[in-house]
Amino acid sequence: MGNFGVYRITNTETLLSYIGSTGKGFEGRWKNHKKRLRNHEHNPKFQEAWDQYGPEKWEWVVVEEMTPVKSPLLEREQHWIDFYDSYKNGYNASPHAGSRLGCKLTEEHKKKISLMHSGKPKTEAFKRMVSRVHKGKVLSLETRQKISQARMGKGHPHTKENRARLTAVLQSPEVREKIRQAHLGTHMPEEDKVKARNTCHEKRIRKIEILDNQEFLTLKQRRYLLGLKASERKFQGLPPNPLGRPRVRAKPPSPSTT
């Protein structure tokens, strides 16, 4: 048996097939398939059929031997995938030879992959590669809402120590300089500026309503309220209060009990 070409693994009960190709030996490739199937590491379609019918119900056949020329190998594998229709009516996970494009993983398979990769440290090269791939992408409103819903309720409350540590990190001169450098040359779109102004306006209105409804205000709260009202007038383009800030009388000292 040669070492280069396309093979077919057929279920003798259903007559459905899996098509593959190899350039390193058919026997070694068949052993590799059986090892992955025994360890439950194969694609879900093939794995499910193997578990259901058992290892005795499979036949291995070489459908085309080739000379060691790499370029037409995947083309011939694609030809036989289409010929036997082994993606829609067979055990190939992808409709394209040599690619996982179009492959659909089960939830169990996704969890298994996630567990295999969880806890592995990411190299700097990997982080740069991921950054390049996603740089410049603009997510649609629907996508952002889906991400928000998926993350909702999954956060972990920070302890006081964690909050203090994060605050100290964010206020350090080195981090502040990095943030400044990252934002140099960037301009906020006019739409975002309007949104930010309106958000601040709504927050001021809510604070004014809350403080105005309180029966008793401390001196500090009164001054804060006056400042809010002044900033609100400025936001609406109104002139400042012509009477100036009203004087706030301090609470008279309580009479001595002596």
Image: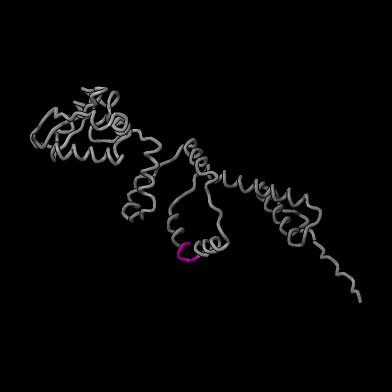
Report how many numbered discs are placed on residues in the image.
0
Quarter in which the N terminus is drawn: top left
Q: Where in the figure is residue 171, as x and y percent of width and height?
A: 52, 64
Residue 255 can be seen, yes or no: yes
In the image, which residues are magenta?
172-176
**Would you say 60 lies left or right of 148 here?**
left
**Residue toward you, 153 or 174:** 153
**Would you say 161 lies left or right of 70 here?**
right
Determine the residue located farthest toward the right in the rendered image.
Answer: 258
Looking at the image, residue 209 lies above or below residue 254:
above
Quarter in which the C terminus is drawn: bottom right
**Residue toward you, 197 or 257:** 257
Residue 85 can be seen, yes or no: no
* Residue drawn at x 85%, y 70% as measured from the top left: 253
* Residue drawn at x 74%, y 59% as measured from the top left: 221
Q: Where in the figure is residue 126, as x and y percent of width and height?
A: 32, 52
Q: Quadrant of residue 5?
A: top left
Q: Where in the figure is residue 43, as x and y percent of width and height?
A: 30, 35
**Residue toward you, 3 or 194:** 3
* Residue drawn at x 59%, y 47% as measured from the top left: 197
**Would you say 133 lies left or right of 68 here?**
right
Residue 215 is a magenta residue:
no
Magenta stretch, overall SS = helix
Q: Where in the figure is residue 35, as x and y percent of width and height?
A: 24, 41
